[in-house]
Image: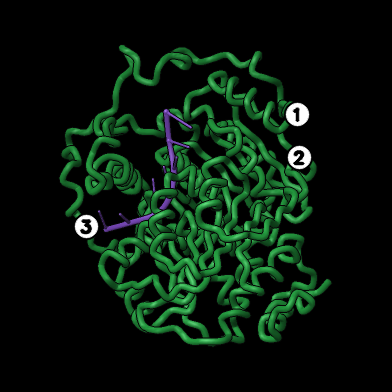
Chain colours: A green, B purple
Amino acid sequence: MTFADLGLSPKVVSAVADAGYTQPTPIQAGAIPHALEGKDVLGIAQTGTGKTASFVLPMLTRLEKGRARARMPRTLILEPTRELAAQVEENFVKYGKNHKLNIALLIGGVSFDEQDKKLERGADVLIATPGRLLDHRERGKLLLNGVEILVIDEADRMLDMGFIPDIERICEMIPFTRQTLFFSATMPPEITKLTEKFLHAPVRVEVARAASAATTVTQRLVKSMSKPWEKRDVLRKLIKQEEEGLKNAIIFCNRKVDVSELYKSLMRHEFSVGALHGDMDQRARMTMLTNFRDGKLKLLVASDVAARGLDIPDVSHVFNYDVPIHSEDYVHRIGRTGRAGRLGKSFTIATRNDTKYIDAIEKLIGQSIEWHDGDLSTVEESEGETDAPRRGKGAPRRAGRKDEGRERKPRGARHDAGEAAAPKAEADQEVQAQPAPARAAAPARKQRDWSNEGNRPPRENRNYRRRDDDDGDTPVGFGDDVPAFMLIEAKV
DNA sequence: AAAAAAG
């Protein structure tokens, strides 16, 4: 079976060959012929099965006839996260290199101007996250009644993220004469309902999970005491111990603040490290991801934004700095390594507070995970409230952090207070605490935007404990060698 | 209990 056998056009077949692919994957072989015939497709497949190409390739073939009109895109692809949307765009560029297609990427966190221009010029392919798409439509810059092909990707994840009402709205804006290609890794009842409502006589293509993670990924649990600096210490030792086979690694944290804290800590310890979470500005997100993919960063500390779908080939290690609370997330996280039949290693740092989550994970994967170096029974907790609520009576509370009631704030106020501003300010102090060489080599800081710092407590009133007080020996400076990724204005 | 997505 070749790509030409599937009925794809010569232009597409040649681009695929140039990309080095010869054999369609099962999802591609199953979906492409039907997609080319104009049928609705319900694809049940995980990422890493070649799912993206299974809609990109037939779409390219079908787009060869016809032309886009201003503000009326011909096709629309919905993705749950910005990075995934950008990744799909890359696929269209790669496989569409023999076509002259206008591609527009509509995602949040970047300016409207360029997106408006692309819409105005007429987009053959529109790739979007739901929020920004609806925003453009409300501004009258976008008409969806010319859409011939609609792709809904990662539907179950959209469900998790509460996007289903948006998806329904969008589906209702598009003529029912369209073709719909619908992909989901799992089929919970809500998703089934959605397919019944919006797909017409779909061809169902289901492929088994790519070789289950269990067979290609070595999984280990690593005991730790529960204080952050203790966990960081465990992690650093683990990284150093694994150094030999460690080509690159993703380190997952459960929370964004922890991503940012761990990132800064690893920076101070001179690891080659980047960070990725949803509160970072979009440029920093992209840069971090690109640098990690290109091997300029060895470690990437990330929230679950990176757990699914991102195509980062050949990650040698996954570290779970936190045990994921949802056991499915564990499977997604460790699935970032051991891809395409390669071997991967995963280490999950576990504290006494995590036992019930570990039990749930072991139940889900149907096997128990080996301890790397003895189990938790040997762990003594340092004095303090490890099992107590995070902020019990005596527990000192840090000013200006962890603003409770964040959820209740109007959305617009979200970025103003708390997490973005406070850690940044704290980071500044640390930078200043560093010796001259590193600063001398750094470029002048761009003028800082103080407009959203109104809610920040005055500098002199803050009494944070320096995070590093117990963080092991703190290295100093970078010398003259400032890595390229540091030169970006990353608000991590 | 947390993440993501609109500004």
Q: Are marks 2 and 1 on the same chain?
A: yes
Q: Quick check: can you spot residue A106?
A: yes
Numbered disc 2: secondary structure: helix
Numbered disc 3: secondary structure: loop
Residue on which the image places disc 3: A449
Residue on which the image places disc 1: A367
Q: Which mark is residue A214?
A: 2
Q: Nearer the viewer, mark 3 or mark 2?
A: 2
Residue for point 32% across, 41% down: A419
Label 1 crowd bin: few (<14), some (14–19), many (20+), radius 10 Å: few
Which chain does tag 1 point to? A
Q: Amino acid at mark 1?
A: Gln
Instruction: Give the Cα separation between the discs numbered 3 and 2.
Output: 47 Å
Residue for point 77% across, 79% down: A4
Decide: is A132 above or below A218.
below
Image quarter (top left, top right, bottom left or bottom right) of the N terminus of chain A: bottom right
Q: Quick check: can you spot residue A264?
A: no
Q: Amino acid at mark 3?
A: Asp
Which chain does tag 2 point to? A
Numbered disc 1: secondary structure: loop
Decide: is A157 above or below A389.
below
| Depth check, front residue: A304 or A428 | A304
Mark 3 or 2 closer to N-term?
Answer: 2
Residue for point 75% across, 29% down: A367
Q: Are marks 3 and 2 in contact (CB under 8 Å)?
A: no
Decide: is A95 above or below A341.
below
Instruction: Give the Cα separation between the discs numbered 1 and 3.
Output: 51 Å
| Depth check, front residue: A209 or A449 | A209
State the image quarter where residue A220 is shown: top right
**Farthest residue, direction right:** A1
